[in-house]
Amino acid sequence: MNKLEILGKYFGCDSFRSGQETLIDGILSGKDVLGILPTGGGKSLCYQLPALMLDGVTAVISPLISLMTDQRDTLSERGINAVCLNSAASLDDNAAAERALISGRAKIVYLSPERLENPRMLSVFSKIRLSLLAVDEAHCISQWGHDFRPAYLKIAEFAENLPKRPIIAAFTATATPAVRRDIFERLRLNDPVTVINSFARDNLFFEVKRQPNDAEKLLDTAGFLRRMGADKGSSGIIYCSSRERTETVSRSLSGMGFSCLPYHAGMSAEERQYSQNAFLSGQCPVIAATNAFGMGINKPDVRFVLHYNMPASPEAYYQEAGRAGRDGKSAVCRLLYSDSDSFIIRALIDETELDGETAAFVKNVRLKQLSAMENILRSGNCLQNEILRYFGENSSKRCGRCSVCDGRTQLRDCTVEAQKILSCVKRMGERFGISDTIAVLRGINSRFITENGFDRLSTYGIMSDSSDKEIREITLELIKQGYLKQSEDRSLHFTESTPNVLYARTRFLVRLPIQSSTAEQFTPADAVKELLSPPVQYDERLFARLKAVRDKVSSVCGLPAYAVMPDNALGEISSVKPTTADDLLKIKGVSPEHFRRCGERLLAEICAYIKEIS
Ligand code: ADP
Ligand code: MG
Ligand code: ZN
């Protein structure tokens, strides 16, 4: 049988997925391979199919017993005889497995990396011909990865001590460039055929939201589950950072009428099995779990993954979030975080007891991963791009689907506008507030203007093409970035950094909501992006608070959030900070209907916020 026939007969697939054939051909031609394919990309097939075509046996190193037995069972359903050697099986079972291997009845053996250190293994493997050694979850070999397993370091030596070194094939879903290098060097791969597929998952929608505390998180979660149709049977995983929280979350959600079960390593094996089966069968659509859940879980129709806490690393985040939408249909990955999440993770890293010289190294890696995770959440840039960048993929095209892209903000060079505003402030004698300055810039004809002789200023009317709102936003940004300050009587004044913008020593960059008419002019070139540190956006703190107000209204009156007040309108509100009903209604996207639903509450929140920061 050729590989396509085997693909159909044993695996029930009619074509290869991206990268699979290259890797399989590599192995069949006797070469080492390195396959970096996203979760759900079909890595198992890359070694299982050649295993059936090669003479001799294929050994698969796998980090988790549940993963091994799962795969063995799936294979045997397909009529392929595979065995496992692991510490959880009885001596008899392991002996039977060894006999199956030696007699040639089993083509594939799954084993843990620790098993290789067992002296028995060398003698077993000296009696059979090992043609392929597949290393699954190969990132475990790197201390830079997120689940380093020292035993992985022994694999290369084991392979080289066999009568004939087998082909080595390494696979992982999450490998930063540093991890990739470690895999290559520590497995001593020999000029491997390498496939690195893009990690971009076009069917996943990433959402990130800061929620101050557990009560808000729970409300948010309930709203989200409803939006995702979890009450109508659509499936999802809620990842929590602690065992207790999986229990409280699933209890609270059950109280709210959702069907949800907990899963964590502290439960008994039967309880865990029960939760897992209920989830896999769809009988219980939602599972609240720690990170102990998921490896080897192959449920294709997971419609959402909700992170109830910030994950400790981008690796963990992307792997867990990646369990959504394996069937290729749209799925949402929402992440809720609060400031205490980072704090708790830091404390855990500090407390981990590790021995020897690697301890400091490992702690350092974990801290780096944590801050990478924080940076992804707070960069204000496209979430998908930030994640991909972390994994060494450069993409400047915004995904257009994540919560940042959807906030429809874009970076804009407003240096020229800023210069006009600043010189107008100067020419008006640094004695007036924002509205008066705008009136002069727009060339308004009023008594105030003529009485002060402002219509004779060179800046009179130089921004007559811009809207009131636009000039206001840029002026507020100038204040926020410290190029203007406002005194008690609200009059505008220069600061010591004003000349930098006025004389174009620095570019003045603003992240503004996209206005359709001017959308084409925005050019967030990478060079410009790098100038931007920290990233500027609309007032994120106020934005988060306004969203919380909006979401509360939405959950109370049972209307979807966007019907109460759309996100992009909230973004503009947070930047413009209107304090009157009139001003609020001037904002694009705010209809009288929206105003009726939550206008007063938003105004109250804005006023409270302004008081706090001024
Ligand atoms: P990974 O280990 O890369 O996360 P798996 O090997 O577990 O992914 O495969 C994920 C799913 O994709 C499995 O259900 C598998 O049967 C399916 N799959 C793999 N290759 C193909 C293919 N060529 N065509 C269709 N389905 C495939
Ligand atoms: Mg896998
Ligand atoms: Zn995006």
Image (cartoon, grey):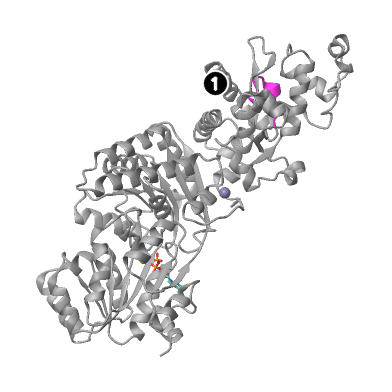
The structure residue drawn at horizontal position 19% and vertical position 47%, both measured from the top left corner, is 355
Left or right, 337 with respect to 473, comes to left
Q: Which residue is mark 1?
A: 609
Is-magenta flag for residue 581?
yes
The structure residue drawn at horizontal position 52% and vertical position 61%, both measured from the top left corner, is 329
Residue 523: give x, y in percent of width and height.
69, 45
Q: Residues within 10 Å of mark 1 (few under 14, many from 20)?
A: some
Q: Nearer the viewer, residue 484 or 300?
A: 484
Q: Nearer the viewer, residue 449 or 391?
A: 391
Residue 229 in sight here: yes
Q: Measured along the vertical axis of the image, is residue 201 above or below residue 71?
A: above
Left or right, 81 with respect to 486, comes to left
Q: In the rendered structure, which amino acid carries the disc numbered 1?
A: Tyr
**In the rendered structure, which segment of residues is drawn in magenta?**
577-587
The structure residue drawn at horizontal position 58% and vertical position 22%, both measured from the top left corner, is 606
Position of the C terminus, as image quadrant, is top right
> Ligand 1 falls in which quarter?
bottom left
Is-magenta flag for residue 478?
no
Residue 269: give x, y in percent of width and height.
20, 56
Q: Measured along the vertical axis of the image, is residue 568 above or below residue 610?
A: below
Residue 69: give x, y in percent of width and height.
25, 68
Residue 311: give x, y in percent of width and height.
38, 45
Q: Nearer the viewer, residue 72 or 490?
A: 490
Position of the N terminus, as image quadrant, is bottom left
Residue 69 in sight here: no
**Does dot 1 land on a helix, a strand or a loop?**
helix
Mark count: 1
Residue 38: quadrant of the picture: bottom left
Left or right, 492 with respect to 275, comes to right
The structure residue drawn at horizontal position 24% and vertical position 82%, both measured from the top left corner, is 106
Residue 373: quadrant of the picture: top left
Q: Measured along the vertical axis of the image, is residue 150 above or below residue 341?
A: below
